[in-house]
Image (spheres, rainbow, N blue to C red):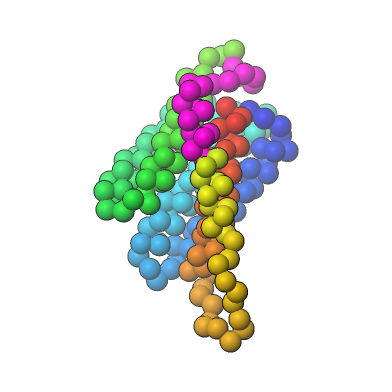
Amino acid sequence: MHGPLSAAWLLVALCAATGAYCLLRMRSGVEEQRRTAGGEALMGFGMALMAVPAAILTPPPWAWLLYGTVFGAAAVRALWAARREAHHLHHLVGTFAMTYMAVAMAVRPATHEHHGTVGAPALTGLLLLYFVGYVLWSGTRLVPAGTVTASGPALPGWGDRPELARACRLSMGIGMLSMLLTM
């Protein structure tokens, strides 16, 4: 990806931290949450790898094709899961966006090695619109509906905190926006 070096490292840190938290969420006692967290961990760590500044590490074209293959397989899995539950459609869009970015980076012309744009501008624009809407929507979901008192029920474990899972998804949405903007 292109962009300022400090912003790229911040994106790497954000995505890696999100992936690590998603791994922690995989310890949940709820089966569906474990599966969702596994897919989100893959996305977080994949985004972190793809966001490493080109000045530090320029992957060969085959590495981008490998990323595209991994995220293409994840997109097929998300499509299969979306048959049962509609919330997997977001995972499908996310994995498709990652596949698109990886393939665009693999086939970019040599003239765009360090400057310029890659990919199809119309598709990039549609993905940007989707993720802007998703970030705004998921940000509003972080606003608490009510207050919690100290005499309330015991707090769930770290892997079962819905507000942290929402913050994780919001972070990945912001990271996806950043990556699409720097293409």
Q: Position of residue 180 (x, y in %)?
A: 55, 32
Which quarter of the rendering shows the N terminus? top right
Relative height, residue 76 to residue 18 (above, below): above
Which quadrant would the C terminus be assigned to in this image? top right
Identify which residue is drawn at 48% across, 63% down: 25
Q: Residue at x 44, y 30 (%)?
A: 100
Magenta part, dominant SS: helix
Q: Which residues are magenta?
A: 112-131
Q: Residue at x 46, y 48 (%)?
A: 42
Quarter residue 36 falls in: bottom left
75 relative to 124 in the view: left or right: left
Q: Is residue 71 above or below residue 106?
A: below
Numbered circles on residues, count? 0
The foreground one among 136 and 3 is 136
Q: Residue at x 55, y 46 (%)?
A: 135
Residue 170 on the magenta span:
no
The percent coordinates of residue 122 (x first, y second) are 48, 23
**In x, y percent, where is residue 80?**
28, 46
**Would you place residue 47 above or below residue 166 in this image?**
above
Q: Is residue 106 visible?
A: no
Give the left or right position of residue 36, taking residue 183 as reference: left
Q: Is residue 46 left or right of residue 29?
A: right
Residue found farthest to the front? 146
Up-down relation of residue 103 to residue 148 (above or below): above
Q: Position of residue 165 (x, y in %)?
A: 51, 60
Q: Is residue 136 visible?
A: yes
Q: Residue furthest top?
A: 111
Q: Residue furthest bottom?
A: 151
